[in-house]
Amino acid sequence: MSRGMKVKVLLILAAALALLMVNAAVFAYYPVTVTVTGVQPVILELGANAGKDDLGADNRIVVTLGPKKASASITLHPTYQTTYYKNVTVIKNLDSRAYYVAIRVNDFADPSVFTEASLIICASSGATIATIDLTATGTSGWFGPLSAGDNFSLDFRFNIDEGVDLPSAETIGFQVIYSPQNVEAAP
């Protein structure tokens, strides 16, 4: 390559690098203000069977709600074969508009222990709206609508085969998601 050609290549490379540095060194900022005003149109409440007797001596169906009723901790005591817990917790709509509900399972029940672990969502009429598999992570589709002033109750069904040991402390975690729309999936 001739000396003139080398100089041209070096000049082109220098110009390209200079252009990159110029573009990388310029930043523009536009101000945006976000006003956040909190509301709580949907709450969790104790179900009709919260606090009632459970299986085993001195065991109860324990439901502890967060101070603003935006979280719940539930303790259940299933046995072998099928155990069904009815109306343990309630999702209550306090608003004048309807909401759609979805469930996201984050911490699943161990499938080597539970042949079935299900969350059953029931309308206030008692009809089953959705059954959520608690042995796998994931987000359900939207169900509802949960009408203004109405509620959905949460039931649980567990099946444990006699060939496995009963769990001493199995934690299952899920989120109740609600939205005024049912077109876009929950992020």
Image (cartoon, rainbow, N blue to C red):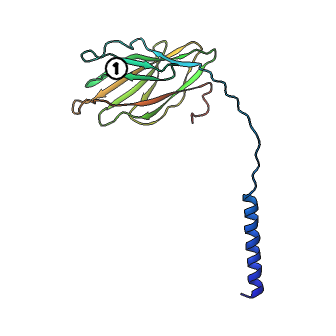
Please tell me which residue is depicted at 60% across the width and 14% down the height of the picture. Answer: 148
Residue drawn at point x = 48 percent, y = 15 percent = 45
In this rendering, would 99 be left or right of 171?
A: right
Q: Quadrant of residue 109 in the image?
A: top left
**Closer to the camera, 44 or 159?**
44
Taking the view exactly as shown, the residue that stands out farthest to the bottom is: 2
Residue 129 coordinates in the image, percent (x, y): 48, 21
Q: Position of residue 78 (x, y in %)?
A: 30, 23
Name the outermost residue toward the left. 163
From what the image shows, is residue 69 above or below residue 14?
above
Task: Report whether 21 appears left or right of 44.
Answer: right
- Residue 137 higher or lower than 149, as above or below: below
Name the quarter where the N terminus is drawn: bottom right
Q: Residue at x 40, y 18 (%)?
A: 63
Instruction: Name the spot of residue 36 as percent of width and height, x first.
Output: 67, 28
Q: Secondary structure at mark 1?
A: strand
- Please say if 29 is above or below 59: below
Label 1 crowd (10 A; few <14 / some 14-19 / many >=20): some
What is the count of numbered marks? 1
Taking depth in this image into account, of 101 and 58 the one nearest to the observer is 58
In this view, the residue in front, 144 or 65, is 65
Q: Quadrant of residue 23?
A: bottom right
Q: Quadrant of the C terminus?
A: top right
Location of residue 76 by image quarter: top left
Badge 1 amino acid = Tyr
User: On the image, numbered disc 1 is attached to which residue?
Assistant: 84
